[in-house]
Amino acid sequence: MTDISIMDRIDPDMAWEAFERRDRNWDGRFVGAVRTTGIYCKPSCPARHPKRDNMVFFPDGETARAAGFRACKRCRPDETARDRQAVERAIALIEEAQEMPALDELAAQVGYAPHHFHRLFKRTAGVTPAAYARQLRADRLEAALHNGGSVTDAIYDAGYNAPSRAYADAAQRMGMTPSAWKNGGQGAVIRWTVAQSSLGPMLIAATERGLCRISFDEDESVLRLRFPKADIRPGDARFAELAARVVALAEQPGLADDLPMDVRGTAFQQAVWNALRTIPPGETRSYAQIAATIGRPGAVRATGSACGDNQLAILIPCHRVVRSDGGLGGYAYGLERKKALLSKERQGE
Ligand SMILES: [Zn+2]
């Protein structure tokens, strides 16, 4: 999230550039004082700029005052610094709190009126306090689910006061439910078949809700490993119809698909998988592009892992993701097959 820490050391070149740009992002992080007028300002002050040689920078108003400068009446640098500190304090309160504090309460604790505080928080942190808290909770839940253990514990540990809130939040954000397949598929009936395709034998498996595994060169033993507590049965006639549609999609990648899916993953994995489904057949994207698409440009490696965790080959087209340098990257079912899939898609349509 936004780093809004107060600077204790100032790079004068950077500070001067911030003044030249009148960069509000640096307000409250340092002040610039003008030797000729004896006044100090925040970087965004609308007043005319002095000569650079006449400027000296301080981490805050207090040190500027100690050096004999007075605050500018126009840009009020000390108020801005107080505002920024209030937001920092509020963020710390949100992070410490077991439940998201009410806006009134939060504002009161940092000494502001609720409406003003809400605007101030949004301007400084880039999101509202509630959005900040939601994001924090969702990130914690994602981390906790990754660490294993009970889903219910993970939900409460992340700061939700009821599982229903976590499910609602998660469903709203990513279209997922956080129960995952961590109970080994207990209570689920999984039907499967191995179908022949021009790309080789395909394992196709589905729960009552939708497809849960599409892969190449595998048989049902994979399902027994992944879902040890599920009731695993060969496909019936209804299932054969579904499997035929999957094979048709593999043979004719441009086919519109509305096949039901029942795959579970973290919010991050779901976001990656959704992004993969937006790549048109025959086109490719890099891992970095997918990471950027889902708003996590720094998470290129995690994006690669999420592609590798894809349970539904073809349907979630992880074969359309390649390396930034144009290299083919990896594929769980062999590079030859990835190449074949892509060239089939490019010729097709
Ligand atoms: Zn000023």
Image (tube, rainbow, N blue to C red):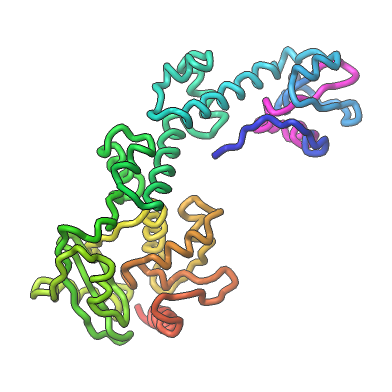
- Left/right of residue 313 with respect to residue 43 in the rendered view: left
x and y percentages locating residue 241 in the rendered image: 14, 74
Residue ranking furthest to the left: 237
Who is closer to the viewer here, 300 or 43? Answer: 300
Callout count:
0
Which of the 4 image quadrants contains residue 278? bottom left
Which of the 4 image quadrants contains residue 338? bottom left
Locate the C terminus and report the quarter of the image it occupies: bottom left
Tell me: residue 105, above or below residue 321.
above
Locate the N terminus and report the quarter of the image it occupies: top right
Query: Is residue 40 rendered magenta in the image?
Result: no
Query: Is residue 22 rendered magenta in the image?
Result: yes
At a point 49% along the width and 16% down the height, the residue shown is 109
x and y percentages locating residue 223 in the rendered image: 24, 71
Q: Which residues are magenta?
A: 16-39
At a point 30% along the width and 51% down the height, the residue shown is 176
At a point 50% along the width and 71% down the height, the residue shown is 322
Which of the 4 image quadrants contains residue 74? top right
x and y percentages locating residue 284 in the rendered image: 47, 70
Who is closer to the viewer here, 63 or 239? Answer: 63
Residue ranking furthest to the front: 149
Quadrant of the picture in which ligand 1 is shown: top right
At a point 33% along the width and 85% down the height, the residue shown is 199
Tell me: residue 298, above or below residue 193.
above
x and y percentages locating residue 137 in the rendered image: 41, 38
Tell me: residue 10, above or below residue 255.
above
Q: Is residue 256 visible?
A: no
Q: Is residue 20 visible?
A: yes
- Left/right of residue 121 with respect to residue 58 in the rendered view: left
